[in-house]
Image (cartoon, rainbow, N blue to C red):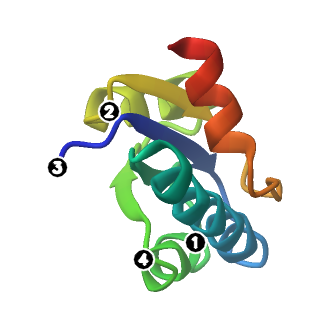
Amino acid sequence: MHPTLSVIIPAWNEEKRVGQAIDSLRRANEAYERRRGATAEIIVVDNNSQDRTAEVARAHGARVVFEPVNNIGKARNAGARAARGKYLAFCDADNRVTENLLCLIHDHLE
């Protein structure tokens, strides 16, 4: 099943925080699946990190794409190009989201 929503996380040297952001999005995705019957994919854009950002992101279940030019706009656009969802949402690597956030985004966009 193709995801309805693609959540894109641009990340540069965020190994200490990105795992928690992904975990909160995965919990929100579980609620999204239960409540709306839809799914979200989580894409982390490794923006030429010098730490283990990409490795941590993969370990937490995100799909990782690489953007070699260290620029937030380029990172967001790389994530958008890789996205398979009908809708795009962006999240920072140091965010924690509430369980109902993806449902709220879905309802607003639908």
Image quadrant where residue 16 sits: bottom right
Residue 14: tell me if it is visible.
no
Q: Is residue 28 left or right of residue 61?
A: right
Q: Residue at x 74, y 48 (%)?
A: 100
Q: Are marks 2 and 1 in contact (CB under 8 Å)?
A: no
Q: Is residue 90 above or below residue 7?
A: above
Q: Is residue 18 left or right of residue 8?
A: right
**Residue under label 4:** 58
In percent of width and height, residue 99 lies at: 75, 57
Decide which of tag 1 and tag 4 comes sooner along the chain.
Answer: 1
Decide which of tag 1 and tag 3 comes sooner along the chain.
Answer: 3
**Residue under label 3:** 1
Q: Residue at x 54, y 65 (%)?
A: 30
What element does badge 1 sit on?
A: helix
Q: Around disc 4, counting alpha carbons within 10 Å, would you say few (fewer than 14), some (14 to 19), or many (20 or more)? A: some
Q: CA distance from mark 2 to mark 1?
A: 23 Å
